[in-house]
Image (spheres, rainbow, N blue to C red):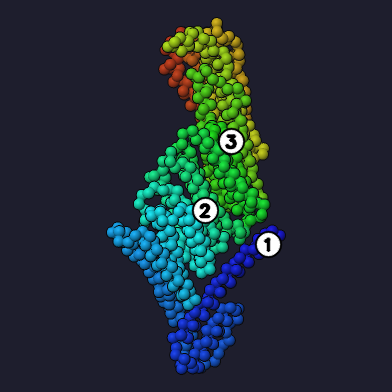
Amino acid sequence: MPDTDEKINRLEARLDKMVEYQDYFYREINLVRDEIKSLKPSSHKTKAENANKTQISGAEKTYSQPSSPPKPKPENQQKQKTYQTPIYNTRLNQSSAKSKSSVEEFVGRNLISLIGIIITILGVGIGAKYVIDRDLISPTTRIMIGYAFAALLFAVAVWLKKKYLNFSAVLLSGSLAMMYFLTFFAYSYYALIPQRFAFLMMLAFTAFTVVAAINYNRQVIAHIGLVGAYAVPFLLSQNSGRADVLFGYMTIINFGILAISVKKFWKPLYYSSFIFTWLIYLAWYLSAYRTSEHFLIAIGFLTIFFLTFYLTFLSYKLIAKEEFNIEIVVLILINSFIFYGFGYSILQSREGFGQYTGIFTIINALVHFLVAFVIRTYRLGDRQNLYLALGLAVTFVTIAVPVQFSGNWTTVFWSAEAAYLFWVGKTKRLSLYENLSHPLMILASVSLLNDWQSAINVNSFFALDSARIPFYNSDFLTSMFFVAAFAFIYFVNADERYKTAANDSVYQFFRYAVPTILLVALYNTFRIEIGNFFHLQIVKTAVEISPKSEFNQAVYRRNNDLYLFNIIWQLNYSMLFLAALSFLNIKRIKSGILGFINLGLNAFILLIFLIVGLYLLGDLRLSYLTQLDAEFFPRGVSRILFRYVSLAFVAALIASSYEYVKRKNFLRERFTNFNFSLIFDSVFYAALLWIASSELINLTDIFGYKDSYKLGLSILWGIYALLLIILGIVKRKTYLRIGAIALFAVTLIKLFFYDIAELDTISKTVVFVSLGILLLIISFLYNKYKDLIFERNEG
């Protein structure tokens, strides 16, 4: 029902406008008829004149009742009528004549008169300047002559209004513009009238201009009488520096435009006054503003201009209960941010007022909240009107946080605003709000990165003077709020009840960007807390071995094993996170693209663990075996056993990856060019060999065997190659057997070029015999199962 009422209101507004147009054309028709009548002598009133009247009357009737087409007439009668009155000529001639007459009418009745009044005003101004420069007449006489000329022009305009409406409107606007600058001139430069009286006069002129523009229904009156008056202070300026007078004068003009906006919606008038006002203010602020003299003037008139234009842009649309179009939305946004930018700069320029910039931002938000409240309470216009005001209010509340505060609060409010705007845009199908949420998502993400950077700095190696309690600090709470906001955005976007109103390419980008940012934020939030935990332990256990002197800082002994535990636990957490994501995707999300990316990340983090993690676990083993700094920090057997905890996370990661590969329809339908079984087997068996080699080195070091990198590894690799060949034969996988042969070749190269260089005779005997037996076994297997290996189809 409310939608029906709004539609009826809009249709009634359109009908009123059409009635105004009909009334205008009716008056024009009567004026043309009167001019024709005045041009003909009374003795020539014949049947032809009566026919003309009938035709004109018929034209009026046709316009008033367009639904009733004229009745067809006999062909001979039509020809006779065509001969008598050319207005009923052929369609082509009628169109050509109409085009020529319309251009001629515009030039003759509108353009020439407009140019004429402008030239007249300039001529009067030049003449006045000549008289003034030579001091030929007194100031009072100059002003009185000017008023007399303006009054004469005004009287002529009123006298011609009935018959020559357009020309009368031009003359009237010119006379009003003259009265404007004459009053300004009399007050500002000659002091002939007091300030209060001058402003009352200009207020009266503005009121009369408003009435005239509405009565004539002509924009030209408002343009010349109001917008043209902006040039007066500059054409007649003598560098008086009276900013209060200038801006007071402009305020009166803008009030007039606001009054017109209630009745009419003349966009060129809005645009002109908007641009002139802010350009004049900008020029004054950059060239003449001085904080000590103009602070209150700058703030006061800045607020007046902002509110004037805000009401101007809102008034007609709200009164007519129409939806804001994109032009009005852009103008309101520009006006709001111009006001905020100037206000912020003015407050920063005054010593001691910089601390109030946050309060100033909140005041901006309250203004828009008030507008939203009025729109909501009185049901003014479409819902988009309400969302625009609310969006601006939320925007300034969000800006107030980084202005008044810093760091985490910025991320919190930007995340909230992005979620709010996206929800409004998606659920209400308002593309403006959905598109505005996208840059805010990026800003919130960048702000979160900045927060993480500060957390990393706190957890640096040299930072022993600060530490954060894990899971109970501002960074963690901020990150969780960010995650919650982006999770909300993700679920709203995934809801099939709501269709996007944004551009398709933008929508597709953020469709994948939002879950990616969400997962990265969730992962990094807890990873940083692991760093916070270990850094706190480092700070707590640091031992001061050299007291701080006047010129030197204190020297601390740190438990370096905690740095190793920190990195390894972050790797363990990364493997757990990816494994959990894998199982969640397989069971619930079921996204092939996410599965493909997940598999790649699984392989990447596994490689990092094999290269970095196992190396750091070796350092922990060495720390236990050497008992370095044991007098400060106990070195327990946990440094040895901890490696098996990490291997459990590796097993979980590999198991989750195997689940992806095992489900043939999950990835293979989308990515047909990838042999996931081959890729998984290659990574799995290579990782298994790497881990087995590391474990062998670990055990040989614990038991004090010195040649762990030589004899032990060579034998292990030979046995592993044999097992791969057996597995390749049983599962009929050629790539396993080829990989095993390649591994055996590497083992033999290692044996001859590295192992035997420093081995004693017994060790050489053992390794050669062992590898020789392994080779014989491999050869035997190939001979025994040659039919199975070479004659059957293999995977």
Q: Is residue 689 above or below residue 578?
A: above
Q: Which mark is residue 641?
A: none
Residue at disc 3, secondary structure: helix
Looking at the image, the residue that sits furthest to the right is: 1
Q: Is residue 595 left or right of residue 185?
A: right
Question: Image point 63% across, 41% down: which residue?
Answer: 488
Residue placed most toward the observer, 759 or 215: 215
Q: Residues within 10 Å of mark 3 (few under 14, many from 20)?
A: many
Residue placed most toward the observer, 544 or 734: 544
How far separated are the C-alphas under marks 1 and 3? 40 Å
Q: Residues within 10 Å of mark 2 (few under 14, many from 20)?
A: many
Q: Residues within 10 Å of mark 1 (few under 14, many from 20)?
A: few
Question: Image point 38% across, 69% down: which residue?
Answer: 116
Which amino acid, by three-letter code, is at mark 2?
Phe
Q: Which residue is mark 1?
A: 4
Give the foreground label among 2 and 1.
2
Q: Is residue 62 above or below residue 791?
A: below
Q: Which mark is residue 412?
A: 3
Q: Which residue is mark 2?
A: 309
Looking at the image, tell me whether mark 1 or mark 3 is earlier in sequence order. Answer: 1
Residue at disc 2, secondary structure: helix
How far separated are the C-alphas under marks 3 and 2? 32 Å
Looking at the image, tell me whether mark 3 or mark 2 is earlier in sequence order. Answer: 2
The x, y position of residue 131, in whole percent, is 31, 61
Q: Is residue 75 above or below residue 263?
A: below
Residue at disc 1, secondary structure: helix
Which amino acid, by three-letter code, is at mark 3?
Val
